[in-house]
Image (cartoon, rainbow, N blue to C red):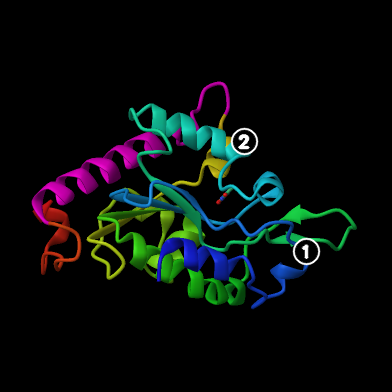
Amino acid sequence: MTLDELRGQALQCRDCALAERRRNVVFGEGNPAAPLVLVGEGPGEQEDQTGRPFVGRAGQLLDRALLDNGLTREHVYICNTVKCRAADWSSGRPRNRAPEESEVSACRRWLLPQLAIIAPQVVLCVGAPSAKNLIRKDFRITAERGKLFKSELARAILATLHPAYILRQQSQTNDGGYGLLVADIAKAWSTAVRLAERQPSGSPAPASQFELEI
Ligand code: URA
């Protein structure tokens, strides 16, 4: 199956209730041959409207953090834990909410093959829901961000702070964690490039002490 075939199927998905209100399935975009894939949480209003990941305020901050590493969206591939907008409609107007576990589970049907087809060297989970989905259920983002883990999804996986969280924390005297986001992208990218040089994609990951080996 190609990425385009998978996208075609995902655009038709009605496996969970998020399908009812979505305007677009936000499948993902960027370089499908990239050594690094970023996996966010899920589309917000602007992503739902445009069908593109990370195009709102959080996305602009993510673009800036990529650029601070000399990277653009053409160097990486960007997608999300869930492909449709999760929102609470109880007040009549949609308010973004975190995806429920059942929605995250349902969407693994698309995310896991997406990662398998791209076969990146490194996956960078952007935010806690992504890390809990792809690294470990009880992943603690503040304590464990920036650390490399072994994974079946890529040669290495790590997590960073979500730019929406950083925007909420920022003040005149506090970067809200922006420096950590930039540093984690730097680590993810340099690890991906080093691994790509060392071993062609598809061969097995080092057996142990991953953090020490790379
Ligand atoms: N936040 C995410 O996690 N993903 C997007 O695509 C946009 C905002």
Q: Main secondary structure of the magenta part?
A: helix
Q: Position of residue 199 (x, y in %)?
A: 11, 56
Query: Which quadrant of the rendered structure holds the N terminus?
Result: bottom left
Span of residues in magenta: 171-199
Q: Is residue 57 visible?
A: yes
143 in relation to 176, above or below: below
Distance (Cα) linking label 2 and label 1: 22 Å
Please tell me which residue is depicted at 14% across the width and 68% down the height of the picture.
204
Which label's residue is closer to the chain start, 2 or 1?
Answer: 1
Q: Is residue 127 visible?
A: no
Residue toward you, 129 or 139:
129
Q: Residues within 10 Å of mark 1 (few under 14, many from 20)?
A: some
Which residue corresponds to mark 2?
A: 57
Q: Is residue 47 left or right of residue 196?
A: right
Which residue corresponds to mark 1?
A: 21
Q: Position of residue 203 (x, y in %)?
A: 14, 66
- Disc 1 residue type? Arg
Please tell me which residue is depicted at 12% across the width and 62% down the height of the picture.
209
SS under mark 1: helix
Q: Quadrant of residue 170?
A: top right
- Disc 2 residue type? Arg
Please tell me which residue is depicted at 55% across the width and 39% down the height of the picture.
59
Residue toward you, 10 or 20:
10
Mark 2 or 1, closer to the camera: 1
Q: Is residue 214 left or right of residue 148?
A: left
Task: Please give the label number shown on residue 123.
Answer: none
